[in-house]
Image (tube, helix red, strand yellow):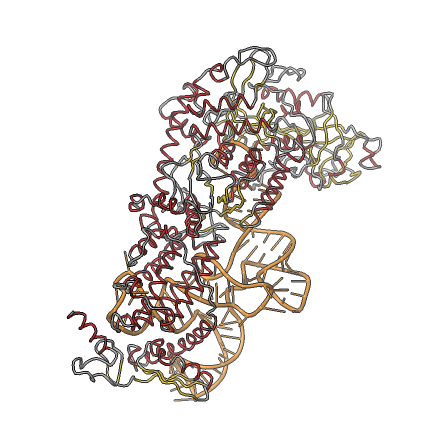
RNA sequence: CGGAGCAUAGUUUAAUGGUAAAACAAUCGUCUUAUAAGCGAUAUUAGCGGCAGAUAACCGCAAGAUUACAGGUUCGAGUCCUGUUGCUCCGACCA
């Protein structure tokens, strides 16, 4: 690694490819909060495979890594650190708080960079892009201006977690679930639509819908009732009126609410069911609010469930509802919907065009339009509302109900869901220029790997609501808009945004907090409406997804000649469909009406040996740092290549041990090859292909066959096939077959003999190619081997290109050799038996006597000279006969002291009486050399 | 709960709807001029039969990874369809 840094390897590669066609992989920035984990390592390694392989295909493939620096986790981390010192965020100026966040991000980033370098990732580590840099923050702001300019931005209301004590919005991460005692009430909403429209039998009846909720205080904000379109609902008789509940819950509801008669045994009698119908029948009918003169719209929504925590207002309890649990049933199958006070409510209300009505202020008090409760605290109002409904007969039943309810992590008080003003990016305005419509068109053009990604992405955009880009936070890029203090006009203009962005470019976005309004606005700027010069700046910041999404312009277009928009590939984990892929696509469209990526590759998550997620508390984590220290970075890289990254990948000690074994195989293959190339000079010692021995030509052809597959696999990012094919090549073709066969020739023949040079020529060519084919994966090992390859002209294998494979058709030769090897397998088995019977020890003590049919005889005769080497025995006889048979006999003659082969001609030479006829000329030559 | 993906020997992976395969690990052997190496072989088991019998070995028969589970389509399913289970990701202030 040091060598690479000293040699400025990355820079050298980029220089080498200066004028080549570009291939841009745009790095998705990891979050600069903590040290890297195995998943981060996998992601970066895969990216490095892509970069290095594309570079070796001859592309100019720069790699500009990035870091995501803004956002909540850093804020919470810093807040905790402050709390430990007894300080509070609120007591610090925002700019100070931001400075601490910035320092924290820098530290984390430096640690990550150190680890990424150790992984062998080459890139512009001295100049990565940071979402908190002044250039980047400036570009982010500018892009917001672009969205404004194109008319996508609007301000609207949206419910968020809200702590009425601290008067602040909360992230889900800042919410704790605790047991809370809430009122649980069943309330009638009289049907306003003619009940005959549901069923003839209901004509003229007084019909009501029954809802259930644990938050009575949201009833004043009720604007609708949601039913599931596919569930069956029942109209049941209750005195002189009729109630509608889900069929499945009738039994439960009548018991709870005391509906229907009781028989002499005290058992509840089933009331009369007047009609049954699907929820879809109720769609868009109307009900009346229990006491306010207002209609409540009946809507169809798939979020409706039959009982349990997911109902009604408990979307507050989302994460809880994800866990299956057997709580007492609750609910009616009809969900009270207050778009200003619940997420599902908001979504469905949006769909049906309901107002986001929130008559509750920052401190949790009802506002002017809630008659009778103005200024009342909402929790205090709960029992009063229940009482009101009991009085007017709307209430069917009320009890106390214990359930898990979100609480503020800081003040430990219950939180509420409350609509607050937010900035949005619209998905559906502007007809066919709408973000959604354009996104669909672009998604089709992008190449997805694996290809179900297209469906997933399209699906995501189908259901995606408008993008809420504002956050009530401090550590991020401020939304550069102003409000006129005199007339309340909102100043959200591209030219103003750009003016602010120019300031950010010089001073970072901290300028927003360090400067007063007049220093942020252009000189002499006055409100276009009232001409006032008194402005207040927006306090919200942009969603961090907006930050990272803007990288397609903030990075791709600010690196001079190095990068370009759009990138060829984005490569991230599958979680980014909703994350970065999503936000980047919108940013790309806003900036250039085009997707910022041509191709998306996703990988799965790293899980443990059993397929479970890795977590520190379970203790099944595999830390990349430890693996590197124990086995080296190349083992980790090899692991990344060996697994199928398109799905979840397992990692455990056993798996890593297997990979380490495989790694040794590669290493030993290279070592053997290099050891036998000592003294070989490719410029003077190369033997022309036509003069090479058949065995060597076969090996080269066989190698090329594999190389072709490997190159295709690299092209399609199928690193697993690369791994498997190279591994097979090394173990079978090279190690078990070729290397074993040529040992004799390499060790025995005179150094300069054609037989030896022929083998070395093949060996040299294959080693050279093997290093190159391995280089993207075994970045260090391949480079080390390549460096030791005699007389090669590159300073590093990473500067070289992949070998070009001749298109020559060697299929006849390859087929013939496959046949030879199948015969070899049988011979080796026979040798094994002879060895077991103690007839021979070394295979060189044997003579193989083959009896084969005529056609096979002819075939083998053409390879006769090579057979003894292929079988690694001293002598071979081939006889024509009926059935195929192999006999192992003791070899004739004496053992040659030098080559251990047996020969009848040992002792012929006077100079060398203990060696065979092959060794004599070799020794002569060696002696001549020694004397010279 | 909803959306998406995955599930083949101890491990990692193969298998146009047509014989479930390879390598590694394991066990055993072998070489000692790739040596923290190389090469090769083996593969599980209740039972039945063969040898006068016993033991071991061997031979034959039969079964044998129930391709997560259960169904379905098909002459034929690891592969296609449906359901179930398990795991993973996503589901608007976690990245």
Q: Is residue A208 above or below residue B43?
A: above
Say whether residue A175 is left or right of residue A204: left
Q: In this view of the protein, which residue sits in the foreground, A873 or A766?
A: A766
User: What residue do we see at 41% from left, 44% from top?
Assistant: A18
Say whether residue A210 is left or right of residue A125: right
Say whether residue A388 is left or right of residue A761: right
Q: In this view of the protein, which residue sits in the foreground, B79 or A400?
A: B79
Q: How many marks?
A: 0
User: What residue do we see at 23% from left, 79% from top?
Assistant: A896
Q: In this view of the protein, which residue sits in the foreground, A365 or A555?
A: A555
Q: Quadrant of residue A68?
A: top left
Q: Is residue A595 above or below residue B6?
A: above
- Specify whether residue A614 is in view: no
- Specify whether residue A767 is in view: yes
Q: In this view of the protein, which residue sits in the foreground, A609 or A106?
A: A106
Q: Residue furthest left?
A: A931
Image location (x, y in percent) of residue A110: 35, 36
Image location (x, y in percent) of residue A819: 45, 76
Image location (x, y in percent) of residue A897: 21, 78
Say whether residue A197 is left or right of residue A15: right
Image location (x, y in percent) of residue A96: 39, 21
- Quadrant housing the C terminus of chain A: bottom left
């Amino acid at each position: 690694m040091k060598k690479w840094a000293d040699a400025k390897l990355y820079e050298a590669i980029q220089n080498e490819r200066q004028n080549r066609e570009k291939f841009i992989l745009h790095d998705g920035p990891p979050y600069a909060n903590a040290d890297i984990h195995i998943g981060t390592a996998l992601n970066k390694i895969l990216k490095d495979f892509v970069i290095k392989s594309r570079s070796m295909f001859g592309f100019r493939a720069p790699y500009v890594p990035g870091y995501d620096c803004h956002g909540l986790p850093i804020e919470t981390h810093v807040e905790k650190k402050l709390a430990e010192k007894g300080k509070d965020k609120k007591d610090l100026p925002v700019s100070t708080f931001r400075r601490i966040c910035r320092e924290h991000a820098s530290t984390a980033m430096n640690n990550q960079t150190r680890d990424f370098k150790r992984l062998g990732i080459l890139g512009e580590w001295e100049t990565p892009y940071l979402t908190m840099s002044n250039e980047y923050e400036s570009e982010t702001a500018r892009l917001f201006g672009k969205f404004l300019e194109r008319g996508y931005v609007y301000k609207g209301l949206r419910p968020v977690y809200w702590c009425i004590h601290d008067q602040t919005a909360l992230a889900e991460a800042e919410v704790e679930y605790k047991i809370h005692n809430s009122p649980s009430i069943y309330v009638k909403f009289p049907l306003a639509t003619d009940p005959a429209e549901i069923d003839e039998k209901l004509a003229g009846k007084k019909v009501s819908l029954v809802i259930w909720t644990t938050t009575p205080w949201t009833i004043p904000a009720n604007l609708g009732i949601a039913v599931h379109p596919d569930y069956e609902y029942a109209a049941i008789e209750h005195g002189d009126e009729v109630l509608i509940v889900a069929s499945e819950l009738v039994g439960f509801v009548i018991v709870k609410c005391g509906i229907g008669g009781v028989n002499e045994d005290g058992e509840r009698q089933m009331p009369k069911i007047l009609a049954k119908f699907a929820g879809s029948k109720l769609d868009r009918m109307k009900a009346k609010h229990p006491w306010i003169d207002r209609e409540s719209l009946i809507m169809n929504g798939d979020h409706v469930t039959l009982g349990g925590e997911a109902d009604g207002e408990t979307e507050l309890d989302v994460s809880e509802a994800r866990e299956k649990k057997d709580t007492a049933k609750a609910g009616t199958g009809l969900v009270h919907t207050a778009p200003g006070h619940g997420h599902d409510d908001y979504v469905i209300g949006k769909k049906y065009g309901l107002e986001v009505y929130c008559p509750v202020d920052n401190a949790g008090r009802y506002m002017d339009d809630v008659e009778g409760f103005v200024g009342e605290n909402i929790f205090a109002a709960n029992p009063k509302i229940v009482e009101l409904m009991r009085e007017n007969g709307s209430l069917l039943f009320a009890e106390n109900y214990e359930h898990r309810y979100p609480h503020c992590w800081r003040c430990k008080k219950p939180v509420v869901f409350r609509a607050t003003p937010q900035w949005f990016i619209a998905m559906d305005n502007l007809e066919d220029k709408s973000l959604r419509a354009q996104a669909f068109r672009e998604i089709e053009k992008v190449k997805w790997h694996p290809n179900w990604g297209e469906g997933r992405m399209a699906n995501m955009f189908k259901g995606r609501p408008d993008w809420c880009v504002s956050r009530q936070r401090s550590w991020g890029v401020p939304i550069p808009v102003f409000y006129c203090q005199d007339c309340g006009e909102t100043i959200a203009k591209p030219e103003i945004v750009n003016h602010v962005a120019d300031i950010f470019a010089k001073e970072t976005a901290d300028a927003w907090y360090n400067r007063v309004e007049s220093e942020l606005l252009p000189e002499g700027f006055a409100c276009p409406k009232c001409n006032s010069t008194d402005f207040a700046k927006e306090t919200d910041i942009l969603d961090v997804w907006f930050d990272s999404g803007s990288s397609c312009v903030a990075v791709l277009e600010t690196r001079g000649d190095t990068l370009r928009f759009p990138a060829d590939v984005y490569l991230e984990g599958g979680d980014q469909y909703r994350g970065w892929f999503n936000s980047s696509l919108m940013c790309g469209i806003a900036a250039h009406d085009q997707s910022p990526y041509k191709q998306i590759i996703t990988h799965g998550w790293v899980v443990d040996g059993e397929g479970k997620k890795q977590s520190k508390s379970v203790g099944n984590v595999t830390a990349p740092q430890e693996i590197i220290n124990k086995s080296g970075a190349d083992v980790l890289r090899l692991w990344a290549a060996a697994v199928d990254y398109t799905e979840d990948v397992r990692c455990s000690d056993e798996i890593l041990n297997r990979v380490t074994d495989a790694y040794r195989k590669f290493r030993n293959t290279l070592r053997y090859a290099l050891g036998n190339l000592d003294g070989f000079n490719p410029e003077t010692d190369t033997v022309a292909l036509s003069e090479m021995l058949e065995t060597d030509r076969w090996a080269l052809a066989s190698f090329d066959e594999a190389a072709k597959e490997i190159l295709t696999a690299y092209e399609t990012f199928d690193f697993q096939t690369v791994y498997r094919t190279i591994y097979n090549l090394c173990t079978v073709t090279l190690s078990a077959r070729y290397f074993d066969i040529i040992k004799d020739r390499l060790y025995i023949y005179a150094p300069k003999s054609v037989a030896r040079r022929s083998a070395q020529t093949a060996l040299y060519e294959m080693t050279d190619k093997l290093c190159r084919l391995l280089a993207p994966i075994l970045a260090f090992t391949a480079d080390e081997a390549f460096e030791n390859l005699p007389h090669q002209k590159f300073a590093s294998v990473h500067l070289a290109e992949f070998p070009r494979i001749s298109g020559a058709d060697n299929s006849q030769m390859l087929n013939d050799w496959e046949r030879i090897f199948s015969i070899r397998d049988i011979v080796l088995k026979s040798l094994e038996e002879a060895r077991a019977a103690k007839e021979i020890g070394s295979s060189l003590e044997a003579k193989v006597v083959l009896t084969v049919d005529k056609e096979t005889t002819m075939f083998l005769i053409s390879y006769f000279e090579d057979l003894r080497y292929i079988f690694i025995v001293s002598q071979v006889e081939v006889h024509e006969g009926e059935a195929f048979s192999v006999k192992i006999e003791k070899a004739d003659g004496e053992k040659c002291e030098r080559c251990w082969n047996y020969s009848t001609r040992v002792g012929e030479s006077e100079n060398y009486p203990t060696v065979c006829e092959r060794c004599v000329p070799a020794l002569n030559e060696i002696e001549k050399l020694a004397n010279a």
